[in-house]
Amino acid sequence: MIDPNYARRVGLSIALVLATCLAVLIFCIAIGDAQEGDNGEEKSGRAGEGNRDQADAAGAGCGEGEGRNDGQASCAGAGGTARLLTHCIIGEGGWSSARDHAAALHVLQLRATRSGRTLVAQALAYAAGCKASRVDAERPKQQAAWDAAVRRVEAFQRGELRDPCRGRAEHWGGTAKGTERDQANIAACVADGSCEVVDCGGTLNTFFRSKR
């Protein structure tokens, strides 16, 4: 015959073991949930950082890390590149000089091809006019000229804009007031035979190419 006290003690021991196992199981589940939550937050944080990195990269691709204004609208999306290039050619060649606009676009394309850069990156690196704030300031009064310049850029993008320099120009320099350094540099390189002026048919800027 089994001692009732012994049976009671055995039953209590079994119950205690089961309770302990249940407590351990609940603890393990809680730890697992906490770790999963931390991992989810970490993944979310990494995804957020990735999105920010992509956004920064997109900005850098457009403006080489420079701030952008309305005239330097985002390069992402349809028409963005055309808007930025329009800003560049107006900043460099004035509002209405179609020859300067066309010549500058072809020079930028030539330089971009040689350097391996995108056209936008090359334009921002080479042409200070891409960042000329006066273009934005004057645009409300020059909307018709802006629209005409946009059409020139779009024709260039379609391969329909003739190069007035016939593919011979590699650089340009200003001839207006405030561009005396450009003029002096061009005169010096022509004088020492390292470059020659290219006739592009009556442009405001001087277009030239290296002879070396």
Image: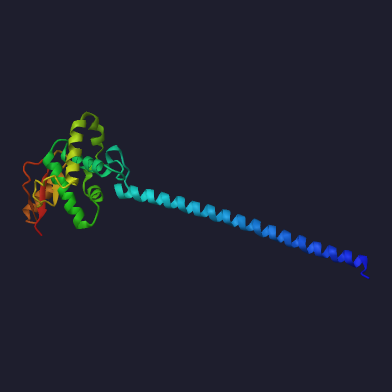
Q: Is residue 179 left or right of residue 10?
A: left
How many marks are shown on the rendered structure? 0
Q: Nearer the viewer, residue 133 or 23?
A: 23
Displayed quadrant of residue 33: bottom right
Q: Percent position (x, y) of residue 11?
A: 84, 64
The image position of residue 211, as x and y in percent, is 8, 57
Image quadrant holding the C terminus, namely: bottom left
**In the rendered view, how is the structure colored?**
rainbow
Q: Residue at x 57, y 53 (%)?
A: 37
Residue 92: in sight, yes or no? Answer: no
Horizontal side of 162 relative to 87 (left or right) equals left
Identify which residue is drawn at 50% across, 51% down. 44
Does residue 39 lie above or below 73 as drawn? below
Look at 19% across and 57% down and name the residue there.
114
Residue 34 in percent (x, y) is at 61, 55
Q: Residue furthest bottom?
A: 1
User: Is 107 rendered above or below residue 6?
Assistant: above
Q: Say whether residue 162 is left or right of residue 56.
A: left
Q: Is residue 139 visible?
A: yes
Q: Quadrant of the N terminus?
A: bottom right
Q: Residue furthest front?
A: 1
Nearer to us in this view, 195 or 40: 40
Asked if 32 appears above or below 98 in the picture, the reply is below
Q: Pinpoint residue 164: horizontal percent, then vertical percent.
A: 9, 46
